[in-house]
Image: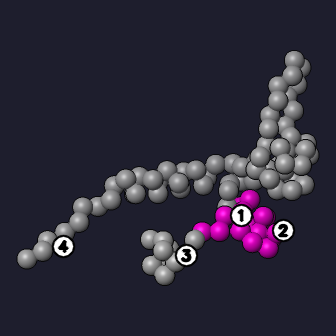
Amino acid sequence: MANNFQLPDYKAEKQALINKEYDKEKVYYCKKCLSLAIISTERETESIDFCNDCGCTDIEEAENINVWEEMYEKRYGHKYVIKPNKTKNNGRY
């Protein structure tokens, strides 16, 4: 007789909780191209933030990553990260 009892996957639950917390963090992005690749440089009297992709210095703040992702999808017509279809058909689980 097989035992079908499985212990809860606490590691996965912990990671899901951590991900939810990260999703609440503010996001800084380039207003011109919506890149998240923002570089901050410190000079003697000031700091300068700029986009590492296009060089623009017009940096904006989004409430969280989901707000930024909606803006990205609206502008470019697709999500920034396209999650794979996790089925046996394409070899991913």
Mark 4 vs mark 3: give the one in front. 3
Whichever of callouts 2 and 4 sits on the residue coming sooner in the sequence is 4
Label 4 vs 1, first from the N-terminus: 4
Q: Nearer the viewer, residue 33 or 85?
A: 85
Disc 2 + disc 1, Cβ < 8 Å: no
Task: Of the two numbered discs 1 and 3 on the same chain, state the one appearing first in sequence.
Answer: 1
Which mark is drawn over residue 75?
2
Marker disc for residue 4: 4
The crowding category of the residue bearing disc 3, from other C-alpha atoms within 10 Å (few below 14, some 14 to 19, many at least 20), is few
- In this rendering, position of residue 18 left or right of residue 26: left
Residue 7's quadrant in the figure? bottom left
How busy is the neighbourhood of tag 1: few (under 14 within 10 Å), some, or many (20 plus)?
few
Percent across and percent down for residue 28 are 76, 47
- The residue located at (74%, 59%) in the rendering is 68
Instruction: Please tell me whether residue 18 is drawn above or below residue 7 in the rendered image.
Output: above
Q: What whole-number distance in Å separates the C-alpha atoms at marks 4 and 1?
A: 39 Å
In the image, the segment drawn in magenta is 67-83
Task: Give the quarter of the figure containing the N terminus.
Answer: bottom left
Quarter of the image containing the C terminus? bottom left
Provide the secondary structure element on which disc 3 rests: loop
Amino acid at pointer 3: Asn
Q: Is residue 14 left or right of residue 61?
A: left
Residue denoted by label 1: 80
* Labels 1 & 3 near each other (Cβ < 8 A): no
At label 4, counting other C-alpha atoms closer than 10 Å, the crowd grade (few under 14, some 14-19, many 20 or more) is few
SS state under label 2: helix
Query: Reading the chain from its start, which is encountered first: label 4 or label 3?
Result: 4
Give the tally of numbered discs: 4
- Mark 4 in CB contact with mark 3 (< 8 angstroms): no
Which numbered dot is residue 85? 3
Residue 13 locus on image (x, y percent): 40, 57
Q: Position of residue 48 (x, y in %)?
A: 87, 33
